[in-house]
Image (cartoon, rainbow, N blue to C red):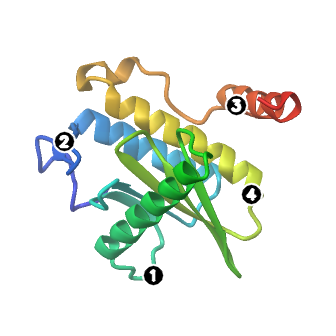
Amino acid sequence: MNEINDPEKKQRLDLRMGVSIFPSQYTAIEQLISELKERCPAQFVFLADTSGLFITAQGRNDKTDLTVLGSLVAADMAASREIARMTGQYKSYQLIMREGEKTTNFIAEAGEHVLLFVQVSFDVPIGWARLLIRETGLQISKIISTPPELIEQLDLGLDDDKLNDALGDALGSLWLGS
């Protein structure tokens, strides 16, 4: 667990965007990110709010300044959103992908107020990573919008049934053009 935002040390984590993450929500997010890191597999997973405020991270980050990374991720998504709006291509849960020599980096919206940065090895299939990241983003959004006392009632996780449904929906929209 991340020492900076350890829910045991705070009643709640107040994001700059006027949203609070309570300990039960934080724990659910940490478990979901851990599952993403394992299932993808991801080398590094980072969560920030849309202003760049660091929330949590898991994995290897090679001494990256997480404050700077949060700011850059937020700025990148803000610029990409505006480009999408200007060109008539904006939709909820935007995803940015950058292929490097050894890794692929994804930046994804996880609801209105949170961004997910995921770094995977170049040998991880892009479609698989995209599916897992999108599903994780949707679930993080659901966690943040659910009252803390109801978190345990949510059906969370990256289980095979949910992934099969998401894959079926993605294939259906590909062939049907919707």
Q: Quick check: 75 left or right of 15?
A: right
User: Which residue position is annotated with label 4?
Assistant: 126
Q: Which residue is drawn at 34% across and 44% down?
A: 113
Callout 4 environment at 10 Å: few (<14), some (14 to 19), or many (20+)?
Answer: some
Residue at the extreme right of the image, as rendered: 175
Q: Position of residue 97 (x, y in %)?
A: 63, 62
Secondary structure under tag 2 reads: loop
Q: Distance between the residues labelled 3 and 2?
A: 31 Å
Do tag 3 and tag 1 residues touch (Cβ < 8 Å)? no
Label ID, residue 18: 2
Do tag 3 and tag 2 residues touch (Cβ < 8 Å)? no
User: Which residue position is annotated with label 3?
Assistant: 166
Label ID, residue 62: 1
Nearest to the eye among marks 3 and 1: give it.
Answer: 3
Nearest to the eye among marks 4 and 2: give it.
Answer: 2
Mark 1 or mark 4, which has the lower sequence index?
1
Label ID, residue 45: none
Q: Distance between the residues labelled 3 and 1?
A: 33 Å
Secondary structure under tag 3 reads: helix
**Amino acid carrying mark 1 in the image:** Asp
Q: Distance between the residues labelled 1 and 4?
A: 23 Å
Secondary structure under tag 1 reads: loop
Do tag 4 and tag 2 residues touch (Cβ < 8 Å)? no
Mark 3 or mark 4, which has the lower sequence index?
4
**Amino acid carrying mark 3 in the image:** Ala
Q: Where is residue 82 in the image (x, y as percent from the top left)?
A: 48, 55
